[in-house]
Image (cartoon, helix red, strand yellow):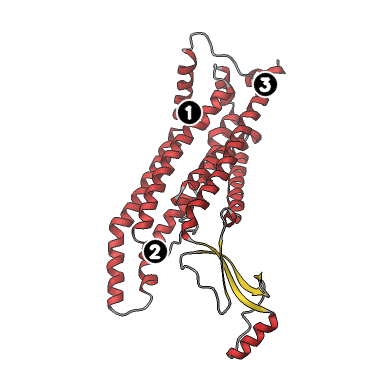
Amino acid sequence: MTAVAAEEAPHRPARGSGGGGRTAWGTVRTVLRLHRTGLLGWAAVVLALSGWLVWLTEIAVEEERAAWEACERAGQDLCDMTIGWVGYSESLGWVGLLISYCFLAVAAFAGGALIGRELENGTARLAWAQGITPARWLTAKLAVPALALSAGVTVLTLVYRWAWGAHRALTDNGWMGDDAYLSRGPAGLAYVLCALALGVLTALVLRRALPALAVSVAASGLFSFVVARYRGSFWPAVTRTSAADAVDYPDNAWELENGVLVRGRRTPDVDYWNCDGTVAEARRCLDDLGVTGYYTTYHPESHYWPIQLVETGVVLSVAALATAAAFLLLRRRTATASAA
């Protein structure tokens, strides 16, 4: 057996090591000790964002509301946009964006510090040589951050849901916006766990910290982008038609598509906006195009939870596949090293 193979080969626990339970707890303690800075940093982020939301909702909003009411009493226009939406709404939106896309930082941590660095500098092989099996090592590496991240994201999601719904009149953050969609439901946590799994898998493939960090972030971002492109098809949308004028649909709906009916068929790319002039001229133009009505396809706000749950299932399925692939890859490499 070569020296490298001997380093990578898994070993059985030494006699008197205290059994599987205490060895497993020792592995968890090792992970906590090695990554205590990252865990403390994550706890600080959760506390800071939660405190920011509480301050916005309970303290800062009162000043915003008073300024808005004074603006309306003075008879000024656009008070909601110049007072509430610029201050409270903008701050709330920034917090929502940080919560929604924190999975990118998780991917960087998982690919770089959590797995990639230990494979690159040899500390993983050292742990395996001291009686910790590769499977148990990887389980601890996944379980400890997953528990910490799940607890933190759950707290942030609950606090943000409370803050987002507390003063809806002062905010223009829609339910399908980038800042409010992921940060108010379980899909945000699913992306965090998926980023963790993708980062670990990438690090096992590349075995270098910096390349794994970059590829993990890119893969997680690309995956979220692709899922967002198909988000509107996760649940059947509502389509309304009108023969006389443009379709009237709820103000808070998420519009997917609109267009005209050409001889009864939906046609989104007909340029009917150029049919202007007098009513008779516009009607004649529409008749020449074959327009017989209008349609709009949208999701009402009641579709938020069905879309959220379907997306959560999709993302968690990818996370499970990435986790299984990571264990299979580690098992194959350590088995090959043992046979060499």
Q: Earlier in the sequence, mark 3 or mark 2?
A: 2
Q: Which mark is residue 171?
A: 2
Look at discs 3 and 1 and give the one toward the viewer.
Answer: 3
**Mark 3 → mark 2, Cα distance in angstroms:** 57 Å
Q: Amino acid at mark 1?
A: Val
Q: Which residue is pictured at 31% across the width and 70% down the height?
A: 68
Above/below status of 318 relative to 138: below
Contact, mark 3 vs mark 1 (Cβ under 8 Å): no
Residue on which disc 1 sits: 31
Between 327 and 41, the one lying in front of the other is 327
As measured in the structure, the alpha-carbon distance from the residue carrying label 2 to the one carrying label 1 is 42 Å
Where residue 85 sits in the image (x, y, percent)? 39, 66
Q: Residue at x 70, y 22 (%)?
A: 336
Quadrant in which the C terminus is drawn: top right
Q: Secondary structure at mark 3?
A: helix
Residue ID at (67%, 25%): 332
Q: Position of residue 7 (x, y in %)?
A: 63, 20
Dot 2 or dot 1, earlier in sequence: 1
The amino acid at mark 3 is: Ala
Residue pictured at 44% horizontal, 54% vertical: 96
| Image mark for residue 338 | none
Residue 335 is labelled as 3
